[in-house]
Amino acid sequence: MAEKTGFVRSFLIVALLLGAGTAAAQDELRNTFFRDADAAKAAAEAADAQLLAPRSYERGMSEYNAAEVALERGRNIDTVRSNAADATRYFKDARTAAELASTALAQVMKSRQDAANARAPELSAEIWQAAQRKFGDAIRMLERGDLKNAKRREIEATSLYRDAELVAIKAQYLSETRRLLADADRARVGRYAPITLGKAKQLLANAERELNENRYDTDLPRNLARQANYEAKHAIYLSEIGGKVRDRDLTAEQLVLEWEKSLREVAGAADIVPDMEQGPVNLERSLVAYIDQMRKDNQALGQEKAENETRLADMEEEMRALDERLGGATEERAALVQRLEALARVKQQFEQVEKMFTAAEARVFREGNNIILRLVGLTFDSGASDIRPASFDLLGKVEKAIDVFPRSELIIEGHTDSFGGDDFNQTLSQERAESVQQYMVNAMRIPTYRLIATGYGETRPVASNETESGRERNRRIDIVIRPNLEAIEE
């Protein structure tokens, strides 16, 4: 009797909905008969049933799709209802099985995710596929209730996933090194650079050992692999040099002189006379001492900067306390604040100008409130003072730097090295400074009253005149910008 009543109710619903319009009827019928199936399907998918309970989930989808087809084609409503009910049941079974599998197969699930995170499907495809097959077997056996064999397959799959993960991690960190070493072996690098090549191979072995022992701590293996890459490339380079020496394309003397050339350039940058009469030992000591001193100087400057910042903060705090005692700002305090703001603005402007030039164009630094533009990229023909067209772009940047400091006073300083007579150098430096001054007047439209051109000859060196690079740095034009603090305050 109950079944008959349910059938009548369904019939009446269908009749009423069909009377309301075909499209609306279809939607309402779907909501009526698929409500439970949709909820069960969503719950199964949330439990990852497609992966962990594929048999039950696929059955549920088969019944679900059949119900949808029956509804679309207007078949007997009992068929739609029956298919939807079967789908609901299978989806519920799939959810239950998936939840069981996620607990029973937790170990293999974690190893599978770890392998995927290591890009094992891409970097260790063969082992990954073997693990996938074992994992699928474990799921199917568990879904059939064969827990014993499911556990056996889980253990096998876990081992394979871990192997795939390790292979993938090694591929990520060691592939480049292996390729370099293979190239080195093909080029027979070991004939001319066996020590360096052997070091590269040992570093690779150490990196691989570290990954075998702890695959998740990759910092050390990555660093070892980076060192191995360097040694492998170095070995290839040394082998090429050895080949040239063997083929007499390069003599031992030429080789040593080429290396000394690089050392001379480094010594020049440090303003050190390159003493290599008995090899590079003395120069090496001088360079090490120079670098140590630079490090100490830099540390001292950093400490001085921190102390100055502390003193400035104390002054600001004292000013605030004074304000409170006086009940407001005084004219003296207002002037002081205005000057501090102007100085801070000069600092900001200096940083702005500093970014305008490359190291090959100019050195930018401060002396008190003055900004110095040391135009290392501005050169002249020997004994001449005419500005080369190649320098116009650099001077265009100089114009932009000057514009940052409105109404500033500009001093153009000419300097030479010590080679040549004193009087000649003095005259040449003055002429070059005046040449730059005239360019500023004509091309930059800077008023002459803002410009001073002064030649210092060889009297103010900034590097040793005993080295070629030092003399080159001494032959220079410096532009001193004296900011107008009152203009900045405005």
Image: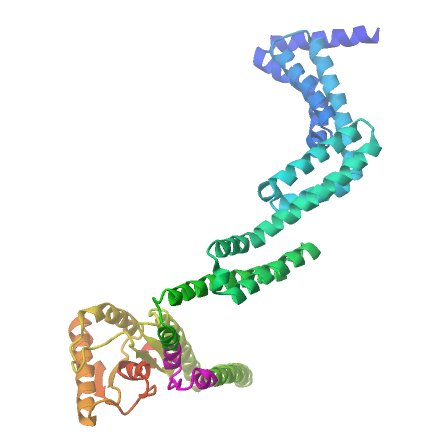
* Residue 51 place in picture, x, y as percent: 69, 32
For image coordinates 64% across by 36% down, the residue present is 129
Is-magenta flag for residue 283? yes
- Establish if 182 lies above or below 56: below
For image coordinates 71% across by 27% down, the residue present is 54
Name, please, the residue furthest toward the bottom: 422
Q: How is the image coloured?
A: rainbow
- Establish if 207 lies above or below 102: below
The quarter of the image holding the N terminus is: top right
Is-magenta flag for residue 280? yes
For image coordinates 26% across by 90% down, the residue present is 418
Q: Is residue 352 left or right of residue 177?
A: left
The quarter of the image holding the C terminus is: bottom left
Q: Nearer the viewer, residue 11 or 412?
A: 412
> Magenta part of the protein: which range?
263-286
Q: Nearer the viewer, residue 479 or 196?
A: 196
* Residue 215 place in picture, x, y as percent: 67, 54
Residue 300 visible in the current orientation:
yes
- Establish if 186 lies above or below 343: above
Tell me where residue 220 sits by quadrant.
Answer: bottom right
Tell me where residue 374 sits by quadrant.
Answer: bottom left
Q: Is residue 232 left or right of residue 265?
A: right
Tell me where residue 258 sits by quadrant.
Answer: bottom left
Q: Nearer the viewer, residue 114 or 24?
A: 114
